[in-house]
Image: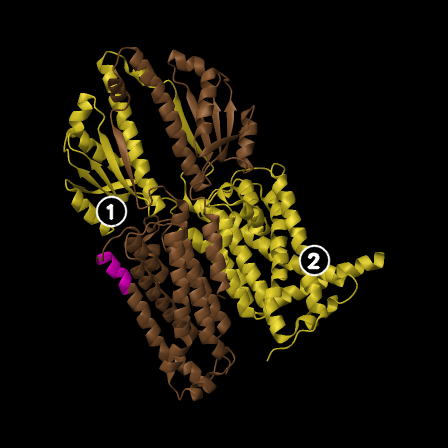
Amino acid sequence: MFKSLIEGLALIYEGLRQEVKLIFSDTAVITSYIFSVLFVFFFYSYVYSHEVIENLSVAVVDQDQSKLSQQVGRMLDGTPQLNVDYRTQSYELAKELYREEKVHGIILIPKGFGRDIQKGISPKVVAYADASYMLYYKQTLGAVMKTVGTMNAQIEVNKMMATGTNMKQAVENRRPFNPVAVPLYNINSGYGTFLLPVVFLIALQTLQISAMGVIGGTLREGGLFARTFAYANKRFGIFFSTIGRSLAYLVFSMLLLVIATLVVNRAYNFPMRGDMFEIVVFLTPFILSVTFLGMTAINFFRKREEALMVVTIFSIPTLLLSGASWPMQAFPLWLQKASVFIPTTLGSQGYLALSQFGASLYEIKDIYIQMWGICLFYFVLALWTNRRFIRVKEKVEE
Amino acid sequence: MLGVPVFLFFMYSNLLSEGVARNLPITLLDLDKSSLSRQFARMVDANATMEIAYEVADEWEGQQTIRTNKSYALIIIPRDFQKHAQKGLAPNITCYYNGQYLLPAGLIQRDFQLVAGSFSAGAKIEVLKKSGNMPEQAMGNVMAIGNENHTLFNPYLNYGAYLNLGFLPMAFQIIVMIVTIYALGNTLKYNKGRELLKQTDNNIVAIVFGKILPYTIVFFIVGYFMNSIIFYKVEAPLNASFFMVNMITLSFIVVCQAIAIFITSIVTSLRTAMTIGGGYTALAFSFAGYTFPPEGMSGFVQGLNYIFPFHSYLRFVINYAVRGISFNAMQSAYMLVFVIFLLLGLLSIPLYYRRLKKGGYNV
């Protein structure tokens, strides 16, 4: 009993040692696994580090040219979202500017605007917001709504004060209650803060699996699989060597994700609110799931180039399936259920909860347990795969 | 290889088939439990975007539902809400929403303001009417200025149409790139360059076209299929000729293949060529400036965008097909990018010829 335990440990160590050697003996593997991951972490963070769009160009078509209509224009220009770069009376001219991509939205103030407000007939500010790019749309509409809301309040309070109410009373009497909307965690709707935590995990998953595919593909192509892992060809050998090999990836990938969580977040001022120890504990089953999935995927890669193809193609779909951009609740049910088998789906949910929302590991124990479940599922498949390739001699290709 | 794009097209259009996110789970903390607060809760629940999935008894519990990804927002109605509202003390109703998920956050914030705004304004109008104002007068008092919004080119804010328009060509161009590199580089990997030259009597043009043209035709069919899904199944707005859209797609296919010739010719192994080609096309989406427009990127990155022909393609298609803008200066800039990449591909043919003459990568 004791002896077999020692043997097991020895096998784990041997698996770890051999795998590290495999990783470092192929430059393509180091490039795609270590350097590309780091490159993606830092480069993507750089691309999105501006976080928000400011001062989007719009045109104001002021057909009224009254004091109040000009105030609307100035207030729009004053919002952080918009910059009124063109003021004109001609709607056709504004349309032309839009077609040339010089402005991304048009705001029209109709004739009689100022007069109608004085008369108490509500005139309308007309916003043409471009929904072919969602952010242009949100940006334009958000600024217009805010401006109109502010002006409305101003006029209403002014009117009340004109009838003798004092300012404090007028403000309080305006509405029976005030709705206040407060964003949490990502308070400026920053795009980098939104995307990067998920990109960290997706990049790691994609590039680690592709590196493992290159290693496996190289071995299969050369017919070297059985020989390389000959040391594991004994009772329970595959079990222990699979654990040993996965430890190699656990160490490197964990290191990369710790760098992402601590260094990249700090360098680009992305928030990080979690406890690093809990994050490491959570990421352990995630990285192991990715590793075992990578081992299983070798079944499909007869040549090393194939690994590179498949994994790049699937990087965006996995991003979409993680539920970060399109809410999970709006998926068709079958995809909601099936997406769990991609490690990043549960992984990014848990990672976001820990690092961005400041949840404790105990609070997300459901996700954590499911993550281990996925890990176990792929572990069994990885065992089967490794056993298959060690036992069966591959046909050597020319 | 053809199965992959078809599968992806199917998955994307299926995933986004809802088009609009509805009934996002939110949490309610009602500390007042008055008739007014219940009425407000019912109005929130009746809104299409939000669904009260959790009702909690204290704030901590409510925060927890957000922290653990169960709900997107927490609405708190304070104690004595009704009493204070009737006294004219204007109490607050607060909606804490999770800003991390941009899309649900935007929807919830907008709809909360909408529901609460109209609820509150409605109450005010009632008060004004009771104090002797005409309905129009009351309306004019509460809302001095209205706004009229024209949602251009995607009137129902259908995210299915919006995202499929970008994601489908994105997957498509990766496949075009990788398959073309594989077709060109396979000969070099197995060092069969000289044999190939012998077979064709040193006719490099015949080799390149022979290798590429069949794929161009196949990809054109796949691209046509893709455009049919985008514009007729998902129903992205189409304000131009469908035939011309396919012609733009065809020229984009050729551009991608031209870049593939370039990449295959300058590297020293098929593996590297595919890594570069795959990485280059996989990065392209971020630089298309679609979900996050270039206005939010630094000047350097804005320039970098043009290195990815996908940027020009997507913007061209949106300008031409979605917005229905006829040919103008901006479009000719995109065309110019295409022409430059095409020239790059043509100029790489001699390089590829040199590689073939050597035999392959490993000689």
Relative image position of residue B226 (x, y in whole percent): 40, 58
List the residue tagged with mark 2. Answer: A243
Nearer the observer, A156 or A85: A156
Colour of chain A as rendered: yellow
Amino acid type assigned to the residue bearing label 2 in the image: Ile
Q: Are marks 2 and 1 on the same chain?
A: yes
Label 2 residue SS: helix
- In magenta, the rendered stretch is B329-336
Q: Is residue A72 visible?
A: yes
Q: Residue at x 33, y 72 (%)?
A: B344
Q: Which mark is residue B132?
A: none
Residue B323 appears at what percent x and percent y? 28, 50
The disc, 2 or 1, on the residue closer to the chain's N-terminal end is: 1
Q: Quadrant of residue B284?
A: bottom left
Task: Assess whether residue A216 is covered by the magenta stretch.
Answer: no
B239 and A134: which is toward the camera = B239
The color chain B is rendered in: brown
Chief SS of the magenta region: helix
Residue pointed to by mark 1? A103
The amino acid at mark 1 is Val
Left or right, B237 with reference to A42: left
